Structure formats: C-alpha cells, structure tokens
Amino acid sequence: MDWLPELIPLSDYGGDFHRYVEAVYRIFRRDFVLSQPLFRGRRCYCDTRMDTDGKEAGFWHVVTEGSIESERMPALRRCERIAWPRAIVEAADTPLVNIWEAERRRPGKGRQVRLSLAPSDFSYLVVIRATSHAYVLVTAFYLEHEHQRKKKRREYESSQNS
C-alpha cells in the first residue's frame, strides 16, 4: 500500500516519547484541525473539545486505545500511522478504499450509524459519522491481527450483499 504516508516511528525522535507525541500531534492538527479533508463533498473534522495536555479529544481518540475513556493508553501503532486517516478519507471514493455502514447502539445515545473506511487489506480502519453539515472523525486504528482484518472484511462483504 504504497499510496499511504510513511510510518512515523518513535525511533525518529530518539525514543523521547514527549517529543514524539508533540510531532504526531502537529501532523494530526494539520490534517484535521487547521484544515479538513473532504468526504463526499463535505468537511471531515475531529472532535475539537480540548482534553488532556491542551490537545483535542479527537486526537487522543486516534492515538490511544482502551474501552474506558479515562483510562485510554497511548498506542504506538496508532501514533505511527497518524497521517493515514486523512489519506484514507481523501481516497475514499477510489478503488483503494472499502466503505461500509456499521450500526452501533450505545446506552443513552441510541442507534448510531457510522461509516467505516479501510484500505484493501483491511489493516487500518477509519470510523466517521455524519452530521447535518459534515462528517466527524470518530476514531482510527491499526488492525494488527489477521482475525481482526477478517472480521472487518466480512462486515464489508456483508454490507455489499444487503
């Protein structure tokens, strides 16, 4: 998948995690705060509520993992691919990206329809949701294990048959 941006490894910053997070944040800020990619003719932006360390909640959702919001931990595989969400959104209407709807039910929030975007090998997933005027980046993450990729591929194939 030579069309996706190069990885940004922690080793490029001498293992200094603080410098690394600042560099990763600058890329995210460039891609989703200072400007936004277009998806189907509408802006795709992130959750700009300020969160930890003066950085947007949308940023932390893309570079951390965990099911309990207040306990999410940084994930290097997510950080390394910080430039991928914008590239995938921008390539969404090409054969390079698979797109499908995924319904999610959340307590107190009801039914939410989200769009999943994945490159052809299903190694990475970008999740967005529609608003009345734009799209919001919900999260994005690397699918490290083959069983995760197969599951997303099945979701995609199932959506194409319904």
Image: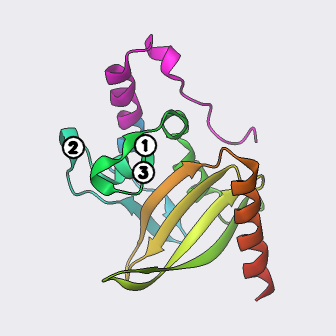
- Residue 13 picture quarter: top left
10 Å crowding of disc 1: few (<14), some (14-19), many (20+): many
Up-down: is 59 above or below 98? Answer: above
Mark number, residue 63: 1
CA separation in Å, label 2 and label 1: 12 Å
Up-down: is 127 above or below 62? Answer: below
Q: Residue at x 42, y 37 (%)?
A: 27
Residue 3, magenta (yes or no): yes
**Amino acid bearing label 1:** Val
Q: Which mark is nearer the camera, 3 or 1?
A: 3
Q: Position of residue 104 (x, y in %)?
A: 50, 78
The quadrant of the image that shows the N terminus is top right
10 Å crowding of disc 2: few (<14), some (14-19), many (20+): few
Residue 124, magenta (yes or no): no
**Amino acid bearing label 3:** Gly
Q: Please indicate, yes or no, whether residue 112 appears anywhere in the rendered image.
A: yes
Up-down: is 94 above or below 159? Answer: above
Do tag 3 and tag 1 residues touch (Cβ < 8 Å)? no
Which comes sooner in the sequence, label 2 or label 1? Answer: 2
Q: Please indicate, yes or no, whether residue 34 appears anywhere in the rendered image.
A: no
Residue 86 vs residue 68, the one in the foreground: 68
**Amino acid bearing label 2:** Thr
Instruction: Check disc 2 and report the residue beneath it.
Output: 52
CA separation in Å, label 3 and label 2: 16 Å
Mark number, residue 66: 3
Do tag 2 and tag 1 residues touch (Cβ < 8 Å)? no
Which comes sooner in the sequence, label 3 or label 2? Answer: 2
Query: In the image, which residues are magenta?
Result: 1-26
Q: For numbered disc 3, what is the local secondary structure?
A: loop
